[in-house]
Image: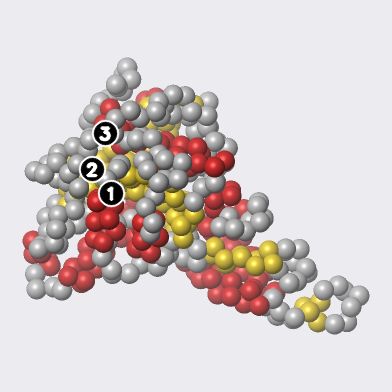
Amino acid sequence: MTAPGVPAGVLTAASQQGVWAWVAVRLAPAAALDDHRGYADVPEEQRRTQAVGQELAWLEALLALGPGFRFELRLRNDPSARLLHGALLGQARGADQDSAVRAALALRDRLTAGPRHVRADPVFDTDEVRDWLVPFTPHPEGLAELRKPLAHAPCTRRDTGRTTSFAVSPLRWSAHSWEPFWAELGRLPYPAVAGICLEPYTVTEDVRLAFRMLADEYARLTAPGQVRPTWNVAAAPDMFASQALPLLQDAVRRYAGPACRSRISLACAEALPPGLAEQFGATAGGAVVCRPPAQERAAAWANTAGLNRNTLPMTYAQGAPAHVLNPVERLLTDLLDASEAAAAFRLPYEVPGHHPLFASPGRVPRPRTAPGPVRGRQPVPPGGDPGAPRFDC
């Protein structure tokens, strides 16, 4: 049901820090890749590469807009039709209802103007927007978060005050097909959703300086140093720091342009089937699968239900000691540049002769909501989303 004074297709909720608004855009493959004139006589792998190039340009334009909103590519299966439904979901915030709604509508227009191989139709039904956000109740063992690989080891030196060293690897784009993962997701006999949420982030000069200082710290650890000034004996280099330093130097170069904070999530109404989350991670640039512990499952699902990005400290630590990551390292664990975002944010496409994977207006026009979603006032989980509203999910 649409709130008074709010256009159809915009869902709103108030918080102590303003008003939040959500919108949705249905996605479907616009045409088979072979049907585009530019793809004539081009091998399939090259067609995919060219399509991703268009998506990368579209993503770069969105990320260049700066912070203030979030958008998510969400894929949702239809167990009866054995097809996937796709949507772009958007979230904006304003000081009041009018400003939040204006920002959300502007975002919806941006999301609708996608690459040519995707059909994008704005959703004008507020209940459908809500159903996209909260399509079912997840199983306790049906949640997974996908993260950039985070390696860690005890630091063998104490001259920088560090007890644990970290190495954050970027996501890597490749030209391989997404069809195997999409097919497995579509074949599930129970409801499931996969989402890639991006929040544009401005890498300021202060942030770049923090990255350089972190790289300098690891550079010191790779060279011999003194454990204590009173000892005239050089301490051995920290071997793990030698592995982490090239990644940090790459981060200094990589995060100089448009960037975003990210959340990649998978949720099922039953327990996750073996290998599905790992297949998702491998396809999405080599992301690592992290299963939220019991105490963070509610917060993980609240992120999906509200299009939020609350921090899950135990989940995101990937086995490292709790709360050891400093703020700069925490930022690196979910910061993506445009090429990393394109590795995970893959819009629907179809290839001639392959089995159809996506619903379209001519096949199944609208996703079917699972019966009996749990509704009620949910507490806002603590973390990186201050002021997030309590969303009815």
Q: In this rendering, does residue 241 appear at all?
A: yes
Name the residue nearer the viewer: 78 or 148: 78
Residue 69 position in % (x across, y down)? 41, 41
Q: Give me the C-alpha separation between circle 3 and circle 1.
A: 15 Å
Q: Quadrant of residue 44?
A: bottom left
Residue 378 position in % (x across, y down)? 48, 28
Identify the residue position indicated by label 1 in the image: 188
Q: In this rendering, does residue 252 appear at all?
A: no
SS class, disc 1: loop
Looking at the picture, does residue 267 appear above or below residue 317? above
Give the amino acid type for the residue marked by disc 3 in the picture: Thr
Q: Give me the C-alpha separation between circle 1 and circle 2.
A: 8 Å
Is 51 situated left or right of 151 in this image?
left
Query: From the viewer's perspective, is the residue at label 1 or at label 2 nearer?
Result: 1
Decide: marks 3, 1 in contact (CB < 8 A)? no
Name the residue nearer the viewer: 262 or 282: 282
SS class, disc 2: strand
Decide: marks 3, 2 in contact (CB < 8 A)? no
Is 29 situated left or right of 274 in this image?
left
Q: Quadrant of residue 238?
A: bottom right
The numbered disc on residue 78 is 2
Residue 72 position in % (x across, y down)? 35, 46
Identify the residue position indicated by label 3 in the image: 369
